[in-house]
Image: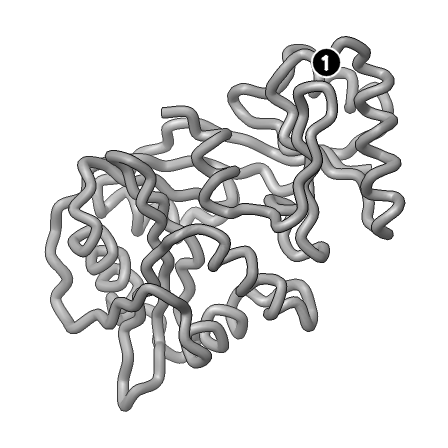
Amino acid sequence: MDFDLLVHNAWPAYEQRSHDGWVLRYAGGVTKRANSVLALDVPDDLDDAIAAAEAFYGERGLRCVFSVGPGATPGLDAELERRGYEVVDPTVIMAGTPVAEPDREVRIEERPWRAWLEAWWAVDGRYGSGVDEAERICTGVPAWYAAVEEDGVPLAVGRGVPQGDTLGIYCMATMPEARRRGLARAALRGLVRHAGAGSAYLVTTAGNEGAQALYRSEGFEIADRYHYRVR
């Protein structure tokens, strides 16, 4: 699987500019994934391409960020390191063919409802008031939104993006007071069952060993890695 493009397409920046084979992505500063350079091709002029990326983000008041994944431009990581770009957010990509059924009811909708957004943002809202931008990113492609609820309140949520014969799983989050009850596991299983895809993948930070253990127990294994370079 081409994880660079799968992740790019599942989490689409609402502003994208092509430059010499690279994609410069912007979405209000919400998440590095949607506000970074996807550098897969070899530009005619590497110095010019990096300068164009730095100008693009500078005009928008952001630091310049490069996503360095399995298909990144050869030699780019070393060149960015030479220029003083720091490694940020090492991430693992996990893939598998999970088949287990959820052991509780999972609500699934085709659009995120307000309570779903509020639950996700309460856990993953690292970007201040960017929930509207985050919703715009999420709804940029068809997706399913899952929640395990109690009394109509989402306690664990997730987002599944159908991508051919695989399912991209994003936005997995559980409210702190509801953890260690198997709710995230149920949301994950609900998305996989609903999609009926032959495989699934997800991304999580390299340091989040708890999440990795959960996903491994559901049939996922580390398939690749990526990180960001930021200056």
Residue with the mark numbered 1: 43
Query: Toward which corner of the image does residue 85 lie, by quadrant?
Result: top right
The relative height of residue 84 versus residue 78 in the rendered view (above or below) is: below
Amino acid of disc 1: Pro
Q: Position of residue 127 (x, y in %)?
A: 67, 64
Q: Give the residue displayed 52% in from the left and 38% down from the top.
A: 8
The N terminus: image quadrant:
top left
Camera-nearest residue between 109 and 188: 109
Q: Is residue 147 left or right of residue 90?
A: left
Identify the element where label 1 is drawn.
loop
Query: Toward which corner of the image does residue 48 lie, by quadrant?
Result: top right
Q: Give the residue displayed 21% in from the left and 50% down from the top.
A: 195
Q: Is residue 55 left or right of residue 157?
A: right
Q: Position of residue 53 (x, y in %)?
A: 80, 32
Label 1 Cα crowd, 10 Å radius (few <14 / some 14-19 / many 20+): some
Q: Is residue 48 left or right of residue 125?
A: right
Q: Position of residue 221 (x, y in %)?
A: 31, 34
Q: Residue lying furthest bottom in this view? A: 151
The relative height of residue 11 versus residue 127 in the rendered view (above or below) is: above
Protein image colouring: one colour
Q: Give the residue displayed 88% in from the left and 46% down from the top.
A: 59
Numbered label tally: 1
The C terminus: image quadrant:
top right
Q: Is residue 227 left or right of residue 102?
A: right
Q: Give the residue displayed 84% in from the left and 50% down from the top.
A: 60
Camera-nearest residue between 164 and 104: 164
Q: Position of residue 122 (x, y in %)?
A: 53, 74
